[in-house]
Amino acid sequence: MKKVKNSSHIQLILLGFSALFLLTIVVLPLIMLFRQAFEGADGSFVGFQNFITYFTTSNMRTSLTNTLFVSTITTIISVTLAFFYAYAISRTNMRGKGFFRFTSMLPLFAPTVMLGIGLIYLLGNQGILTRFIGLNLPLYGSFGIITALSIFTFPSAFLVLLVSFSFADNRLYEAADVMGTSTFKKFRTITLPSVKYGLISSIFIAFSLSFTDFGAPRIVGGSYNVLATDIFRHVVGQQNFNMGAVAGVILLLPAILSFVVDRLTQTKNTGTVTSKTVEYKIKLNKVRDIGFTAYCIAVNFIIFLVLSAVLFASLVEQYPWNMSLTFRHYVFNSFTAGGITSYFNSLLVATLTAIIGTILVFLNAYLIEKTRRAKLLRQGAYFLSILPLALPGLAIGISFIFFFNSPNNPLNFVFGTMMILVLANLANFYSVPFVTATSSLKKLDKEFEFVSESMRVPAHKTFFKVTVPMCFPAILEIAVYFFVNAMVTVSAAVFLVPAHFPLASIAIINLEDTGNSAPAAALSVLIILTNIIVRLGYEFTAKKLKKRTELKGELQNV
């Protein structure tokens, strides 16, 4: 019995450490951000004076208005596209669903700066479509930002809506058919109400992502200022940290609102599937299937067109004057904006983020779910674990400057090193893997722990021999999530990247700024290829594990 008590004490200590870690990288930097927003340049308290200055300055008001406009139009476009795409995958018999599901994820594997570069090569002054088709569109400004962000936010909205469409009660549709209800009325009265919470969540997610993105406005924004570029100008360009903090606080508002709405919709969306629910049956309809197949092909064509433009740019000598093929741009030796070194730096940071993040997230989720003591501590740790959902990368980057760069902070030694980037990634991407880990752990029977305790088996043995093997697919998924996002992130890293340790996503911006668009495209291609390989490796491994599990089950039944 003594071993069990010791295990319980160790669990509480580890849970306390986990909560303290999250407090350090999430809450304390956030407090410093708010403090800076209410202080003057001399450190004195000035109340709301900085906010008054911000809203009474015409340029800053214009940036906020522009951001609201761009985010609203982007949300309408991306959610509309994602809605019908998710409907096509879940409610039709069209072929190639696995292919279309995977290709819809491609924008997640690329930094938004890559999407901007692709649009420049397609629609810029010397763009492919501009020169050869005569398509003359105002790329630099709101149009370019909205186009890039619509592609960027589409996969996130699609994933949420796909989950919503997967739950449906076929009895409602059967009753409607008996009553002779038209297809449109069934869509309006049954389908829409059944996915309304997912639709609301996707709207707020798309709005929040577009409201806080830095990469697309920086590449194709031109002179069209938005809040994200305003923050960069205040903090990096003008060293006006107080106004940068004000803009950072404003940037938090839609993200916090999105977080609250997402929590509320998830709470209200429970219980939609019961034991009496009948699985939705897709009826045969060739015209519908052909139509939605054409729609999915059209959406994929846009995505592939932009990504292919980047690949094309990286393989030609000097577009549009010398169109001969070359791999010269993948050498990077003649460029000083980071080049291949930045790529390997990104690989290192992404790998460390994946390893450290996966261990911390899964251990934290396990302790919260399986520890039966210290209810208040577990609730506090859970809140700290989902809080990063409400924090955009830019706000995290600025808050890290204020917190870790303070000379009074004993953790000051971390600032300016590679580890500050890893910590920023953990703070930025912590919540989604935590939810994944929690969902996986909830599926395990609690009898495992009860039996282990009754047999006086230490908790760590149960953890490593039972819990980890059974949750291994989820653990792999968490690692891949951390890795992919760490490879493409720009928002937080742009404020924190050390001069001696460039990252690939930031190097792309620097190369584009210096007119080296082809090497920037080549570096973008390396990032997306790396992420695709990692994702495909995960899919292959997960499939192998699933087959092995099914085979073991069949042998046990025999």
Image: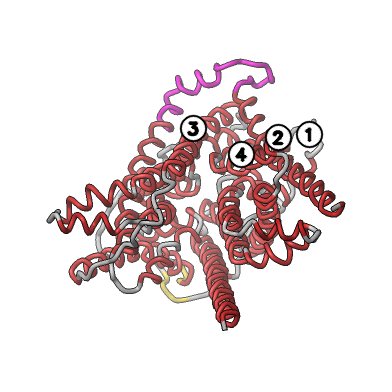
Pick whichever of labels 3 and 4 is earlier in the sequence: 3
Percent from the top left, x then y, of residue 206?
A: 41, 46
Q: Which amino acid, by three-letter code, is at mark 3?
A: Leu
Numbered disc in front, either 4 or 2: 4
Which residue is identified by label 4? 383
Q: Mark 3 points at which residue?
A: 253
Q: Which amino acid type is marked by label 2? A: Phe
Q: Do the residues labelled 2 and 1 touch (CB within 8 Å)?
A: yes
- The type of residue carrying mark 4 is Phe
Inspect this view and state whether residue 344 appears.
yes
Q: Residue furthest front?
A: 454
**Quadrant where the C terminus lies?**
bottom right
Nearest-to-viewer mark from 1 and 3: 3
374 relative to 62, above or below: below
Q: Name the residue under label 2.
A: 403
- Badge 2 or badge 1: first in the primary sequence: 2
Position of residue 57 relative to residue 333, above or below, is: above
The image position of residue 263, as x and y in percent, is 48, 40
Give the mark nearer the N terminus: 3 vs 2: 3
The image quadrant of residue 297 is bottom left
Magenta residues span: 38-63
Residue at the limit of the structure toward the left, as seen here: 180
Disc 3 on helix, strand or loop?
helix
The structure residue drawn at horizontal position 39% and vertical position 60%, both measured from the top left corner, is: 121
Numbered disc 4: secondary structure: helix
Q: What element carries label 1?
A: loop
Q: Can residue 151 be seen in this view?
A: no
Disc 4: CA contacts within 10 A as few (<14), some (14-19) or many (>=20): some
Q: Earlier in the sequence, mark 1 or mark 3?
A: 3
